Image (spheres, rainbow, N blue to C red):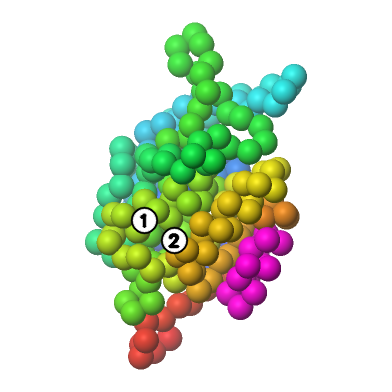
Amino acid sequence: MTCCASVAYLGADLGRVEAIFLSHGHPDHYGGMPAALELATRRRRRVPVVMHRTALRERMWVWPGHRGGRYRLDPAVLRSRRAAPRFLEGPEPSLDGAALFLTDIPRRTPYERRRPGGQVLYRAGSRWQLDTTPDDGALVMYLRGRGLVILTGCGHAGVLNTVREAVRLTGVPRVHALVGGFHLCGAPRRRIAATIRDLKKFSPRWVVPSHCSGLEFEAALQQAFPRGYALDMVGTEYSWAAPGAAV
């Protein structure tokens, strides 16, 4: 109901949706999937759901001395007549080649090998193992004459790992906009400082942190990129045009 109410309030027509990209299999990202599929398929058509197969893992959050509840995206949602799941095991061109969907992002930045705060376990048979969230995804687009626009879900793979992989695969060294969750809530000051230092090397024109980025990191971003910082909010639309293009 919350998903439907929000869509109605924003005046969004999900019937025009041509594909759904699931950033990863955490409930705050897939929770609205059944309602979204229902709204998107009212015209009796199936909608592709692009995702990494490990988004279907059974998981749970853990903190020192505490374990959270278990959760999992119900596969029955994807077996319904409304969804046409498309599983990816790595980066792949999407949207008729207009975008690149990143999954299985390599963890090459040393200080990004472990997520800050609580950890996640996943069920592997009868055992629980540390989960690196290989399904963590990002959508990458190229804006001619400007650079890359990178949209993350939570950034569990690491902000720098995501940016570096987008640059490596596209061959475009310039980042125009970095938007989404960066998952640095609870990160130590040293890691925040290192992330800002390395992010500056890509000179992004816009940085737009969303949920789970962390207040300390958001404040550091605002100080480091005062002319290109914007705090993301529900319902906000962004329009970046190539030089000379009409908006």
Task: Judge by depth and name the residue closer to the eye, 35 or 92.
Answer: 92
Instruction: Please give the range of residues in magenta.
Output: 218-234
* Residue name at image x 42 percent, y 35 percent: 134
Asked if the stretch drawn in magenta spans residue 230, the answer is yes
Vertical position of residue 133 compared to residue 64: above or below: below
Q: How many labels does the image show?
A: 2
* Residue named by callout 2: 150
Pointer 1 or 2: first along the chain: 2
61 w.r.t. 137: above or below: above
> From the viewer's perspective, is 62 left or right of 58?
right
Which quadrant of the figure contains the C terminus? bottom left
Report how far apart the C-alphas of labels 1 and 2 lie in the structure.
8 Å
From the image, state whether disc 1 or disc 2 is nearer to you: 1
- At numbered mark 2, what does the secondary structure look like: helix, strand or loop? strand
Residue ID at (44%, 48%)? 161
Q: Can residue 145 be seen in this view?
A: yes
Is residue 32 in view?
A: no
Give the residue type at disc 2: Ile
**Residue 225 figure quarter:** bottom right
The dot on residue 166 is 1
Between residue 3 and residue 129, name the one nearer to us.
129
Check whether the beta carbons of the residues at disc 1 and disc 2 lie within 8 A of each other: yes
Secondary structure beneath dot 1 equals helix
Between 146 and 98, the one nearer to me in the picture: 146
Q: At 63% across and 67% down in the image, what residue appears?
A: 224
Name the kind of residue labelled 1 in the image. Answer: Ala
Point 50% across, 27% down: residue: 131
Q: Quadrant of residue 93?
A: bottom left
Where is residue 141 shown, x and y percent of the image? 36, 64
